[in-house]
Image (tube, grey):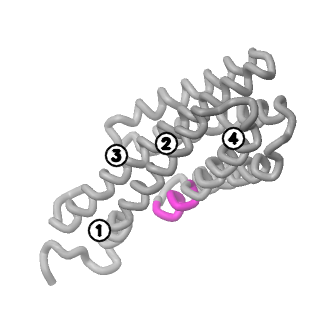
Amino acid sequence: MSASAPVPGSAAEAAAGIAKLWWLFLITGVAWLGVAFILFQYDAASLATVGYLVGFMLVFTGIEQFMVASAVEGWKWAWILFGILFVVGGMWVVFNPLASAFALATSLGVLFVLIGLLWIIEAVATRSANPLWWLGLVSGLLMVGLAWWVSQQNTLEKILTLLTFAAIWALMHGIGDFIRAFQLRRLGKLVAQGAPA
C-alpha cells in the first residue's frame, strides 16, 4: 500500500472522506450569502417572505448541526440538541409566516440567544484544535448581548433590528462556510500527502 494512501477504516480515511465534501460548504456559503442579500432588502410589505427565509435558514442550520454531530466524536449531544431546536424553531416560523410582529420578534430574540450559546459551545469545544477559537467565543457573547439589547426596544424596532441581525448572521454564516470549505480542502490535501492535519 502507498505511504500516502489512508489506511482503510482509519481516522485518516474518515477525514479524507469528509474532506471530499468541501464543495458542499462552498454551495451552502453561496446560499447563505443569497439569503443575507434578500434579508437586507427587507421592507414591511415582505414580512411573509422574510418569515419563510428566516424559517428555512433556521431549518438548514439545524440540518448542518446534525451533519456536524455525525462527524464529531465529542459533544454530539450539543450538536443534536441545537439541531432539534433550530429545526423546530424554523418550522414554526415557516408555518406561521404572518404571525404577529411581536411573536416573530420574540421568537427571533430567543433564537439569537440560542445561536450565541451554540457559538460559545463550539468555540470552547474546538479550542484545542482551533487557534482562533476565541473569535467564536466573542461572537457568541456579542450575539447574546445583542439579543438582550433588542429586547429593550418596541415591537416595530425589534422586528427591524432582529431582521437586520438575521441578515448579518446569514452573511457571517456564509463567510464561515467558505472558510470551512477551504479548510476541508486543505485537510484532504494533507491527508493525501500523509502529513499531520
Q: Which residue is mark 2?
A: 173
**Residue type (three-letter) at the residue carrying disc 2:** His
Q: Which mark is residue 129?
A: 3
Q: Position of residue 187 (x, y in %)?
A: 27, 58
- Tell me where the magenta segment starts and ends, as one range: 65-71
Left or right placement of residue 98 versus residue 149 in this view: right
Q: Is residue 190 left or right of residue 149?
A: left
Q: Residues within 10 Å of mark 4 (few under 14, many from 20)?
A: many
Up/down of 111 relative to 162, above or below: below
Question: Visible in this render: residue 77?
Answer: no
* Magenta span dominant secondary structure: helix
* Mark earlier in primary sequence (4, 3): 4
Q: Residue at x 55, y 26 (%)?
A: 141
**What mark, if any, has residue 50 been given in the picture?**
4
| Residue 183 in the image, given as x and y percentages of width and height | 31, 51
Who's the residue at 44% across and 49% down the image? 29
Instruction: Tell which tag, 4 or 3, sits nearer the viewer.
Output: 4
Instruction: Report the front residue among 146 and 158.
Output: 158
Earlier sequence position, callout 2 versus callout 3: 3
Residue that badge 1 annotates: 12
Q: Mark 1 Cα within 10 Å, few/some/many (few <14, many 20+)?
A: many
Per the model, the C-alpha gap separating discs 1 and 3 is: 16 Å
Under circle 2, the secondary element is helix
Tell me if 24 is positioned left or right of 96 in this view: left
